[in-house]
Image (cartoon, grey):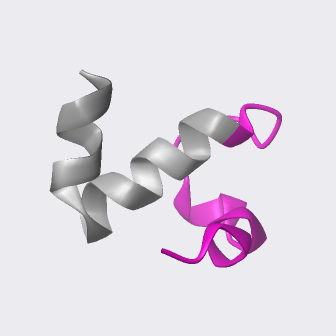
Amino acid sequence: MDVKQIESVPEDAPRPVGTTEAVIEDGAAELEPTIVLGRE
């Protein structure tokens, strides 16, 4: 999972750029649904 890549495209993220953790969750939700399950 490329975290830097997700942070580089805040336009694709529905949440503010300030919430980096939220952006990572949104990106991971599309790439690795299993990761999101652990956070729920």
Q: Is residue 30 visible?
A: yes
Q: Position of residue 38 (x, y in %)?
A: 24, 33
Asked whether, in this view, residue 10 is left or right of residue 14, the answer is: right
Left or right, 27 with reference to 33: right
Spot occupied by residue 12 in the image (x, y as percentages of width and height): 54, 63
- x%, y% of residue 17? 77, 43
| Outermost right residue | 18
* Residue at x 73%, y 63% (from the top left corner): 7
- Quadrant of the rendered image containing residue 30: bottom left
Occupied quadrant, residue 15:
top right
User: Does 24 sit left or right of 31 as displayed?
Assistant: right
**Residue located 58% across and 46% down the image:** 23
Q: Is residue 11 magenta?
A: yes
| Residue 15 seen in this snapshot | no
Over which residues does the magenta segment extend?
1-20
Task: Name the one closer to the observer, 35 or 14.
Answer: 35
Q: Nearer the viewer, residue 36 or 18?
A: 36
Residue lying at 44% horizontally and 59% vertically, measured from the top left: 27
**Residue 12 against residue 37 in the figure, above or below:** below
Q: Tell me if residue 13 is in the magenta stretch.
A: yes
| In the image, residue 28 above or below residue 22 | below
> Can you say whether 40 is above or below 33 in the image?
above
